[in-house]
Image (spheres, grey):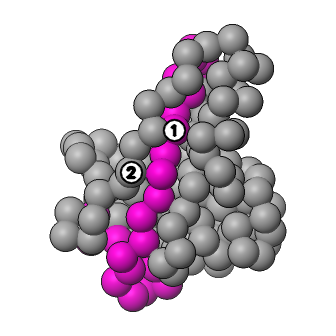
Amino acid sequence: MITNFLDTDVIVQIGIIVKDINKTAQKYAEFLNVDFPEIIITDEFEKTQAHYKGQPTEARAKLAFFRNFKNIEIELIEPDDNPSTWREFLDTHGEGVHHIAFFIKGMKEKVEIFNQKGMPLIQKGEYTGGRYAYLDSTEQLKVIIELLEND
C-alpha cells in the first residue's frame, strides 16, 4: 500500500552530472558490460519551455541512459554553459549524483505539495511525451527530487 504523497513506491532513475559524457558513459558501459549508449541532446527552448529558478533558460544537456536494470535507469547528464540546475550542480559540487526521479501523475499538485514542505521548484520543462520538474529537496533529503509525468 502506497502512503506517501507521491503516490508511488518506485524510484525510476538516478541522475548523475558529469563533465565528459563520452568518457563517463564508456566507463559505465565497461563496468556494466553493456553496449555504449546513444548520446542524445535535449531539445531547444521552443520545445522544452525550460525554466530555471522561474526564468526561461536556453539550457541544454547531453544525456545517456543505461536502461539495463529491471527497475531503475542511470542517467548521465553533461550540461551546457547556460543557467540550469545541472550547470549549477557541476559548478558548485562537481560531478556526482544530482537527483533521484519518480514517475508521478498530477504534476502541478505534486509540485505544490513539495513547495508547501519547503522544497521549491528549481527547474521544469517539457520532453516528447511528458514533462519534468526538479525540486530543491537537498536540505531535507540531501538530493534533488525529479518528478516525471508522461502523457
Residue that extends furthest to the bottom in the rendered view of this protein? 55
Residue 17 drawn at (x, y percent)? 66, 54
**Residue at x 49%, y 46% (from the top left corner):** 63
Identify residue for label 2. Answer: 41
Distance from disc 2 to disc 1, alpha carbons, whole Å, reads: 9 Å
- Give the quarter of the figure containing the C terminus: top left
Which of 26 and 119 lies nearest the eye of the viewer?
Answer: 26
**Residue at x 60%, y 40% (from the top left corner):** 22
State yes or no: residue 85 in magenta: no
Say whether residue 2 is visible: no
Residue 79 drawn at (x, y percent)? 54, 63
Q: Say left or right for 137 vs 131.
A: right
Mark 1: few/some/many CA within 10 Å (<14, 14-19, 20+) = many
**Residue at x 70%, y 67% (from the top left corner):** 90
**Residue type of the residue flagged with mark 2:** Ile
Q: Say left or right for 42 vs 101.
A: left
Say whether residue 58 is visible: yes
* Residue 19 in which image quadrant: bottom right
Which of 72 and 8 lies nearest the eye of the viewer?
Answer: 72
Of the numbered discs 2 and 1, the one sitting upstream in the chain is 2
Identify residue for label 1. Answer: 64
Residue 118 drawn at (x, y percent)? 65, 78
Range shown magenta: 48-71
